[in-house]
Amino acid sequence: MSNNTFRKKLKSGNKPKGGPRKSIFSWIEEKLDITGILGEGVPVQLVPPVGFVAILALIYIWGNHRAENMVRKIEKAQQEVEDLRADVTTLEAEYMLSSMQSEVAKRVAEQGIFELNQPPIKIEVEK
């Protein structure tokens, strides 16, 4: 068999620094000390109720998040409606002013069309 050429052998005086590395999960397990609370394992009868409560908590968080987003959208829509209502009121006032007979007469006077001062004459045709 051939020798392992990928790893270099450590000399007897050189040891790896830091000792064995701990994973983050072993660090969390060490800090939380779950075995002191639950014993050597998680009791199987606790898994369904804890899972149910976790699912309810997720549904509650999701519902609150959705409700807050909906409130934000409603407030934004109300602001847009208010702005559009103000624009419509302004445009209606301008239209009412521009459609008055005196305003129309001023605009068409430039084209040589003048307002009649006499009432219209009715033409009768015999049958």
Image (cartoon, rainbow, N blue to C red):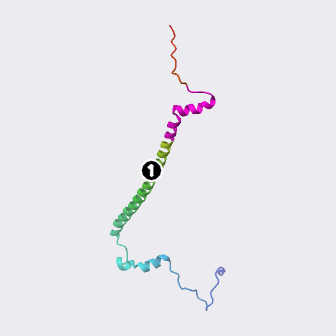
Answer above or below: position of 78 versus 111.
below
Answer above or below: position of 28 versus 51.
below
Give the residue at mark 1. 78
Residue farthest to the front, as pictured:
117
In the rendered structure, does residue 111 fall within the stretch colored magenta?
Answer: yes
* Residue closest to the eye, 67 or 91: 91
Residue 11 sits in quarter: bottom right
Q: Is residue 11 left or right of residue 121?
A: right
Answer above or below: position of 7 versus 55.
below
Which secondary structure dominates the residues rendered in magenta?
A: helix
* Residue closest to the eye, 85 or 107: 107
* Residue closest to the eye, 64 or 9: 64
Q: Is residue 103 left or right of residue 79?
A: right
| Quadrant of the drawing holding the N terminus | bottom right
Number of other residues with Cα within 10 Å of mark 1, as a class: few under 14, some 14 to 19, many 20 or more: few
Specify the segment rendered in magenta. 91-115
Residue found at x 47% / y 45%: 85
Residue found at x 51% / y 37%: 97
- Provide residue 37's location: percent of width, then percent of height: 35, 78
Q: What residue type is labelled 1?
A: Gln
